[in-house]
Image (cartoon, rainbow, N blue to C red):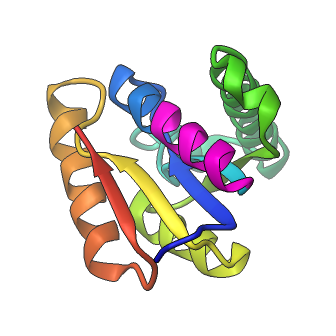
Amino acid sequence: MLKPTKILVPTDFSGHSDRALAQGLDIAKQYKAKLILLHVLPEDMYRSGLELIFLEEKVRHEIRDRATDSAQESLQKQLANFPQSKEVEAAAHVRWGVPYDEILKEAEEQGIDLIVIASLGRSNISRYLMGNVARNVLKGSTCPVLLTK
């Protein structure tokens, strides 16, 4: 029987992700497991056309740092919306890259026993993308994946 000690919950801050987080927190509380909430920022998030070519490296790093800080704050707020998060050991991580690749890397690096992921994302295009993310996580994961509706 699966008794997870580390649970990974990827989020895009949508209502669907909130439901996955609630499920992950319930499981973490039940098994006294650590929960890691993860948000992946796409590498090309702040690149539009040629403007990046003209930005100094220092400015590009500042933009990236601000985006990372903002995502970290959003993760903390998302956790704070769930009272049960105070009853489990929880951490919030931000990564940059292709979402499903980074989710799988995080799972491997952290020794994750269970991934709890939403089947859908935040908007029509996000739903399509999150569906692809969830599908690719399911295909590539070496640990069990709980797909929430």
Per the rendered image, the range of residues in magenta is 21-32
* Residue 37 shows up from this direction: no
Residue 100 is situated, as x and y percent measured from the top left of the image, at 40, 64
Q: Is residue 76 left or right of residue 140?
A: right
**Residue 26 visible within the image:** yes
Q: Position of residue 93 (x, y in %)?
A: 72, 49
Q: Which residue is drawn at 68% across and 50% down?
A: 35
The correct choice, above or below, for 91 with respect to 108 in the image is above
In which quadrant of the rendered image does the C terminus lie? top left
Image coordinates for residue 111, horizontal then vertical, percent = 68, 78
Is 31 situated above or below 141?
above
Q: Nearer the viewer, residue 57 or 73?
A: 73
Q: Looking at the image, is 75 positioned above or below residue 131?
A: above
What secondary structure predominates along the stretch shown in magenta?
helix
State left or right for residue 30 relative to residue 70: left
- In the rendered image, the residue lying farthest to the bottom is 142
Magenta-span inclusion, residue 31: yes
Task: Say whether residue 39 is left or right of residue 115.
Answer: right
Q: Give the x, y percent position of residue 36.
A: 68, 51
Q: Dividing the picture into quarters, in which one does residue 137 lie?
A: bottom left
Q: Image quarter for residue 73?
A: top right
**Residue drawn at 44 percent across, 62 percent down:** 98
> Is residue 41 left or right of 59 when viewed as pictured?
left
- Image point (48%, 50%), residue name: 42
Q: Is residue 15 above or below residue 134?
A: above
Q: In which quarter of the image is residue 34?
A: bottom right
